[in-house]
Amino acid sequence: MKIGACVVATRSAALLLVGAVSACSGSDGGNASDAVKSQQQALCTGIGQACTMPDGCSGTWVCTGGFRECAYNNTGSRACSTCPGGIQACSDTGPYGPCQWTSPHACTNTCGSGTQTCSDGVLSACNVAPSTRACNCNTGTQTCTNNSWSACSGSPTQSCGNSATGCGGTRTCTNETWGPCTCAVGSATSSCHTSSGDACGTLGSGTCAGDCTLQGACTVAERCNNCDDNGNGLIDEGQTCSPCGL
């Protein structure tokens, strides 16, 4: 509103008050009525009190050039959207600096749980402290750094065997699970077991299959021990044994 040369209304006001007192200057030239003075004073109330700028920054009501305006007061911050839930600082001229989180947020990656920051919509890498875990079916360890696991220190392959046949081979760890024991087909064993041989403490011989079983029977040779090693019902047959089994 204009009162003589002084404008005292908000910029959006459209009412022209002729001969009214200026709420900013307090001068009316002696012509303003009490009603006009009252309306004018209402338009410029709250000077010095807090207000909010259109961009969300905090401000203070001031009277400038006869207008009541909300002016930046160089304090606080405003909400921003490029980092969800973030804030941006406010100055005496408006928002400045990046939109960012006030504190790191929780995150997870290959290495585990950590934290990350956001600046103007750009997320930092998830910061996870280096960690170590067993690998290759507990034969070794590996360390995770910068979202990447190192190679396993242990071998994925180890020796294995079939205690019943005496056939020895290897097995491989895949996805932290051991595969079956595998033997060379046709390899020989001299450590297979039979019930009769076991009763006499004598091991037999045979030929190994790929799954570490025997391709045929376990053969136990008779020996001088006063025992039926091969289980044919005869003791020490075909042997020339000295007295007392020596």
Image (tube, rainbow, N blue to C red):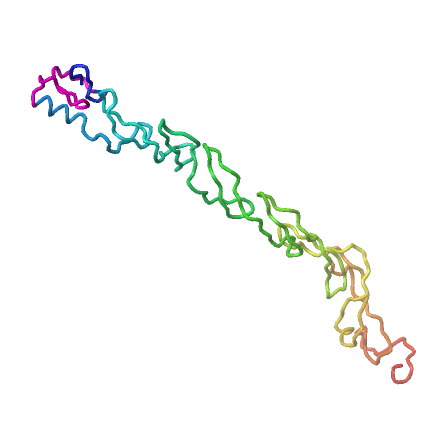
Q: Residue at x 61, y 46 (%)?
A: 149
Q: Which of 170 and 10 is in front in this view?
A: 10
Instruction: Give coordinates of residue 128: x percent, y percent.
Output: 54, 46
Q: Along the horizontal axis of the image, is 233 left or right of 30?
A: right
> Where is the C terminus found, in terms of image quarters?
bottom right
Q: Residue at x 8, y 23 (%)?
A: 35
Q: In this view, does 16 lie above or below 173?
A: above
**Res. 216 image quadrant:** bottom right
Q: Along the horizontal axis of the image, is 113 left or right of 135?
A: left
Count of marks overlaid on the render = 0
Whether the magenta-drawn stretch holds residue 27 is answered as yes
**Res. 6 image quadrant:** top left
Q: Along the horizontal axis of the image, is 149 left or right of 118?
A: right
What is the chief secondary structure element of the magenta stretch?
A: loop
Instruction: Give coordinates of residue 222: x percent, y percent.
Output: 85, 73
Q: In this view, does 8 lie above or below 100?
A: above
Q: Which residue is drawn at 50% across and 45% down?
A: 108
Instruction: Give coordinates of residue 205: x percent, y percent.
Output: 82, 65
> Where is the N terminus found, in terms of image quarters?
top left
Magenta extent: 13-34
**Res. 84 image quadrant:** top left
Q: Which of 62 and 100 is in front in this view?
A: 62
Instruction: Give coordinates of residue 40: x percent, y percent.
Output: 14, 23
Whether the magenta-drawn stretch holds residue 54 is answered as no
Query: Quick one: which residue is furthest to the bottom in this view?
Result: 244
